[in-house]
């Protein structure tokens, strides 16, 4: 099976009240851990590449490793550009074989967001590629761009119909209180389910995307802090909230930070317990196993997409 788009995945997810996991990939062990988990759980998969990942690992390497994942697993896998910030970057990914791209023009005005997104949609659709856009602004860190909480803004449900109609976009990321990174809430976690519900009413049958959806497992934070790290106050989105979102219009849930925490906690602990190790396989292997465990848990206990490949 070649790489697939998200069209079929999202239709089934919407109708079935579950979500597909979109996991960020940066190296071979992360890709393998995710794909092993999806294979065990027979789950459809979105592997996503940020601009930072492209810079770090080289798109050709990532693309070839994702192709290897398709070949070895036989799963329906979508290769997605995460947070494309320009038409040129999206075009480059379309041209190099991605099956889905995100154009994130959410920092622009509503009108500019529409026109930039429309341009990407026209090019992508001509090439059989689907497009995700963003309306509203999440707080947190993406690449080198930090959006302060004060500059973040919830999605306005009054704008979503016009946005989707004018752009022709295939899915829409909305801001309901999640943020990127490991420090999401200062106090009580709170998501604006009222906005999600209203957006769902305005766009019946249309797939919604939730970014910044890591749960920040405290067992990993504890290990990191125990072995010399410094992450007091790290806090994520409670999993019951994600399950609720998945049962509503949310069809794609983005997870990156939880994989980073799993890798970092595992490697920190590994070196604390095995100070003489210097073969990368001795610590990258356990890190890959930890990624697999996190992703299996997400697929089964949070997303509900196990058995849906
Ligand atoms: O949305 C942000 C993702 O976690 C990707 O992060 O841009 O540092 O690769 P990155
Ligand atoms: P987290 O930082 O919560 O994992 O979010 C990742 C994300 O939204 C990637 O686009
Ligand atoms: Zn994101």
Image (cartoon, rainbow, N blue to C red):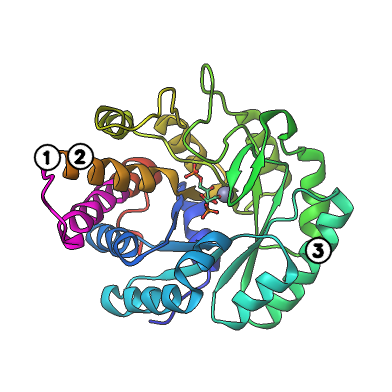
Q: Earlier in the sequence, mark 2 or mark 3?
A: 3
Res 85 → quadrant: bottom right
Mark 3 falls on what kind of element? helix
Q: Secondary structure at mark 2?
A: helix
Residue segment shown in magenta: 274-296
Residue depicted at x 53% and y 42% = 212
Instruction: Considering the whole magenta stretch, tell me its main secondary structure.
Output: helix
Where residue 120 appears, as percent x and y from the top left, is 74, 70
Q: In 3D space, how far apart are the residues under numbered discs 2 and 3 (Cα atoms)?
A: 45 Å
Q: Residue at x 76, y 75 (%)?
A: 122
Residue, disc 1: 273
In the image, residue 95 sits, relative to residue 118, either above or below, namely below
Residue that carries the numbered disc 2 in the rendered image: 269
Residue nearest the observer in this picture, 243 or 256: 256
Element type where label 1 sits in the image = helix
Front residue of 53/246: it is: 53
10 Å crowding of disc 2: few (<14), some (14-19), many (20+): some
């Amino acid at each position: 099976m070649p790489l697939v788009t998200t069209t079929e995945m999202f239709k089934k997810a919407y109708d079935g009240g579950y979500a597909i996991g979109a996991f960020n990939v940066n190296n071979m062990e992360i890709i393998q851990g995710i794909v092993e988990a999806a294979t065990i759980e027979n789950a459809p998969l979105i592997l996503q590449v940020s601009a930072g990942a492209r810079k770090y690992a080289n798109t050709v390497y990532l693309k070839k490793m994702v192709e290897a994942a398709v070949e070895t697993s036989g799963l329906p896998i979508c290769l997605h550009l995460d947070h494309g910030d320009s038409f040129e970057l999206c075009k480059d990914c379309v041209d190099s074989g991605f099956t889905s791209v995100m154009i994130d023009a959410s920092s622009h005005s509503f009108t500019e967001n529409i026109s930039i997104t429309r341009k990407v949609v026209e090019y992508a659709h001509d090439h059989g590629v689907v497009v995700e856009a963003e309306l509203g602004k999440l707080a947190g860190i993406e690449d080198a761009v930090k959006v302060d909480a004060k500059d973040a803004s919830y999605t306005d449900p009054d704008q979503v119909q016009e946005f989707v109609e004018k752009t022709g976009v295939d899915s829409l990321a909305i801001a309901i209180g999640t943020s990127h990174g490991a420090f999401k809430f200062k106090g009580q976690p709170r998501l604006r389910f009222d906005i999600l519900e209203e957006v769902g009413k305005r766009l019946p049958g249309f797939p919604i995307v939730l970014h910044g959806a890591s749960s920040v497992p405290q067992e990993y934070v504890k290990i990191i802090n125990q072995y010399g790290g410094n992450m007091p106050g790290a806090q994520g989105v409670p999993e019951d909230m994600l399950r609720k979102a998945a049962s509503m219009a949310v069809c794609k849930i983005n997870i990156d930070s939880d994989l980073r925490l799993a890798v970092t906690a595992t490697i920190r602990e590994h070196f604390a317990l095995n100070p003489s190790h210097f073969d990368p396989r001795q610590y990258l292997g356990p890190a890959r196993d930890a990624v697999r465990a996190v992703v299996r848990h997400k697929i089964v206990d949070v997303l509900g997409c196990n058995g849906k490949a």
